[in-house]
Amino acid sequence: MRRMLVRFVYGSRYDRVPHGQRAYVRPGERLIREAQWRLRLRRTRVCSLIEYSGSVPLAENEEFLACTLCGEERQQPLFEPAGGKGWRYRVVRCPRCGFLYRNPNVRPERLGDLYATSYSSFLTGTYAEQRRRRYELTMRAFSPVFAEGGGRRLLDFGCGAGLFLGLAEGLGFDAVGVDLSPDSVERANAALRTARAYLGDPDDVPEIAAGGFDVITLWSVLAHLPRPLDDFARFRRLLAPGGVLMILTVNANSLLLKAYGSRWSGFTKNHLMFYSSATLPALLRRTGFAGVAFAPHYGDAIEAGTTRLPVKLRRRLAARVRAGDGGNMMRALAFADQESLERWGAEQKAREL
Ligand SMILES: [Zn+2]
């Protein structure tokens, strides 16, 4: 029925627009999706944590959570994403602050279960090319922070097979990375020249625990962190005066989430928490950061200029992303202190927390 309606309204005009771009370019669609979203929030029941935990199954590696950002216990169950190899989980919204998170969530000590299969093969090949492009586009969006390393110290948290570390050392950063996967770390160190990757918890690696980093990067890591308050308090400690923390993650305010619900691409098997520019500031404020800036994400093909979308539709897409803060990824720069705000903030249109 819905498909027929779409056909009736738009004809075949947008058939050749890739799926991930259509919702941004079809006339009126943003406003319709936003209205549907508000309706959905009004209509979906809100229940107590006790009621919720009594009605939902709990696996032995899982636990029920209250809102990590504001402590609210009430739950608004919204989505049940599921994937090919039999995984399925539930995503709730905090009715107080709007944070979206998996609930039940994975117990931190059982996180290894999610990464039991070899992860590093996932980070090489064609996928690696796309990743590299994404790094470069994001660095460009946050220029001049990444324009030139100049010997500044950089920590890549969750460095995988070292793709980004390779770029960072090429730019002249004094770069180190840390990751939990032994074969990724081994692969990284085989390829890197001056940068180094370390295995394990940052607190167990003296070179990292000593801190003093000018830049910390979290490439597609934030959504995987089960205890973000602890992690961000640590990142704040590890930053030197004037330091910045760069974050790339899926955007919980994405227009595509509003359009596709449980089938949204950001609901991947190992994602635990979903942030937006409305909820990330709470995490940063609570862990001692001084400011934040966001760079809207228009999609890698658009930003890299490889899209075949006509110019008129490209402009329309960009306007829609900006109007609703609805890009599919969220890119943020967090400023450790006043010094970093003064040094980098103006260029990035930063706001204080
Ligand atoms: Zn909350």
Image: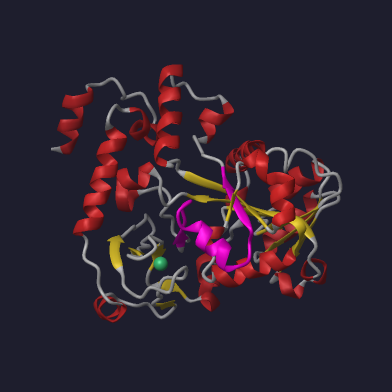
Q: Which residues are magenta?
A: 273-294
Q: Residue 162 at what x, y percent from top left?
A: 71, 52
Magenta segment: does it hold 287? yes
Q: How many marks?
A: 0
- Quadrant of residue 205 within the rendered picture: bottom right
Residue 228 sits above or below residue 329 on the image? below
Whether residue 142 appears in this view of the structure is no
**What residue is drawn where x is 29% and y is 81%?**
50
**Nearer to me, 120 or 255:** 255
Q: Residue 169 at what x, y percent from top left?
A: 80, 46
Residue 313 sits above or below residue 95 on the image? above
Q: Residue 209 at what x, y percent from top left?
A: 77, 70
Residue 324 left/right relative to 306? left
**What residue is drawn where x is 28% and y is 33%?**
29
Residue 233 left/right relative to 322? right
- Quadrant of residue 71 within the rendered picture: bottom left
